[in-house]
């Protein structure tokens, strides 16, 4: 019988399974019991993706299937900067990165992949059908085609074509400033504003726990819009964009990939949880590390982590306000606003 999800104070949990450290006492966070399915994913596009993941989890499916099926929804959407509908690189090509990891340290990823609709499924095939972890570029595409994935035409979505035409007017190559505060203008690397007034993002990252208490994660992205050809971000790098340790927890990152890679972001967050920090406190620790490294340049970048531990506690932390993540469990389907270093 599934218990109700509880919202409780860390202080009330101190000592629970040795999981919570006194350092985060007083911080609110969510808690669902181990073995109760839960899925969280980055940004508001996560709501639709979680629905598909939840269909798997709520019918006793595996976390691995859930995180694949979930992000496939976002990859299929033409209205989002994930998948083939996304913004191209500065030469006009959409190039995609994705990674997946299960409860047994099995992992697979693809990077700089062109013309394939579901990079996440190719990443899973790399994990399951090859002795390797990562395939890139032409080799990744060749593998995908050999596995039966159709090669799609290289045609930009309407939105991406419009964004690219605008960018071409200046063709300015700035260091990417991905998803800095939604309302700020940050040149060609700012997220695109859609006709419906929403902002779209380049990435979806998802982590889930199934009825058996097993964790898995996925991450899929077009990277930074108008990036240099061949640029690869954190999302397909196991330990940077995604990490899962089934004894401890899982983490996925979004935002400026270069700065996530520098601190092996998702792995570092999982290690912090191993030391007893709550998911939110663990995410905050690694955000602080990035801020220390970037100094005054931290104000120009956005990075956010979301994390889930083995007991179903979840949390996040970002550099700038505006980041939110989508949650789905037995009792909830909602967006959770993230705390951030800069509070505007
Ligand atoms: C990257 N981390 O390629 C990705 C971009 C991202 O929302 O998360 N955008 O650097």
Image (cartoon, helix red, strand yellow):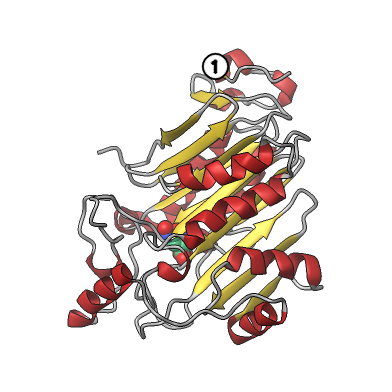
- The residue located at (70%, 35%) in the rendering is 310
Residue 160 in the image: above or below residue 92: above
**Residue 206 horizontal side relative to residue 228, left or right:** right
How many badges with numbers are in the image? Answer: 1
Residue 236 in the image: above or below residue 58: below
Q: Quadrant of ligand 1?
A: bottom left
Residue 259 in view here = no
Residue 211 image point, x, y percent: 74, 33
**Residue 274 horizontal side relative to residue 297, left or right:** right
The residue at the far left in this view is 169
Residue 62 in the image: above or below residue 14: below
Residue 6 image point, x, y percent: 57, 17
Residue occupied by mark 1? 8
Residue 62 in view here = yes
Work out whether residue 255 or residue 272 is closer to the camera in this orientation and state it.
Answer: 255
Local crowd size for mark 1, using a 10 Å CA cut-off: few (<14), some (14–19), many (≥20)? some
- The residue located at (38%, 47%) in the rendering is 319
Mark 1 residue element:
strand
Where is residue 22, by image quadrant?
top right
- The residue located at (28%, 50%) in the rendering is 198
Residue 160 in the image: above or below residue 43: below
Work out whether residue 284 or residue 330 is closer to the camera in this orientation and state it.
Answer: 330
Name the quarter where the C terminus is drawn: top left
Work out whether residue 185 or residue 260 is closer to the camera in this orientation and state it.
Answer: 185
Residue 97 image point, x, y percent: 54, 69
């Amino acid at each position: 019988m599934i218990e109700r999800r509880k919202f409780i104070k860390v202080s009330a949990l101190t000592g629970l399974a040795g999981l919570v450290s006194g350092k985060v006492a007083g911080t609110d966070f969510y808690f669902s019991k181990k073995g109760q399915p839960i899925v969280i994913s980055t940004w508001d596009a996560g709501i639709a993706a979680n629905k598909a993941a939840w269909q798997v989890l709520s019918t006793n499916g595996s976390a691995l299937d859930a995180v694949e099926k979930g992000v496939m929804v976002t990859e299929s959407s033409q209205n989002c900067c994930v998948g083939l509908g996304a913004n191209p690189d500065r030469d006009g090509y959409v190039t995609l990165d994705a990674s997946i990891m299960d409860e047994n340290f099995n992992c697979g990823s693809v990077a700089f992949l062109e013309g394939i609709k579901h990079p996440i499924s190719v990443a899973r095939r790399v994990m399951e059908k090859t002795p390797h972890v990562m395939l890139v570029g032409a080799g990744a595409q060749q593998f995908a085609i050999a596995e039966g994935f159709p090669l799609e035409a290289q045609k930009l979505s309407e939105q991406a074509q419009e964004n690219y035409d605008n960018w071409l007017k200046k063709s300015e190559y700035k260091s990417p400033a991905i998803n800095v505060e939604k309302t700020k203008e940050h040149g060609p690397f700012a997220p695109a504003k859609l006709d419906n007034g929403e902002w779209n993002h380049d990435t979806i990252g998802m982590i889930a726990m199934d009825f058996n208490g097993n964790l898995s994660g996925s991450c899929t992205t077009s990277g930074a819009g108008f990036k240099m050809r061949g640029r690869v971000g954190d999302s397909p790098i196991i330990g940077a964009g995604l990490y899962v340790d089934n004894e401890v927890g899982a983490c996925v990152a979004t935002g400026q990939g270069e700065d996530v890679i520098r601190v092996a972001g998702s792995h570092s967050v999982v290690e912090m949880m191993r030391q007893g920090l709550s998911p939110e406190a663990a995410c905050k620790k690694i955000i602080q590390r990035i801020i220390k490294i970037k100094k005054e340049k931290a104000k120009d970048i956005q990075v956010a982590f979301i994390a889930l531990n083995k007991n179903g506690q979840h949390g996040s932390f970002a550099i700038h306000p505006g980041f939110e993540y989508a949650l789905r469990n037995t009792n909830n389907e909602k967006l959770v606003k993230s705390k951030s270093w800069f509070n505007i």
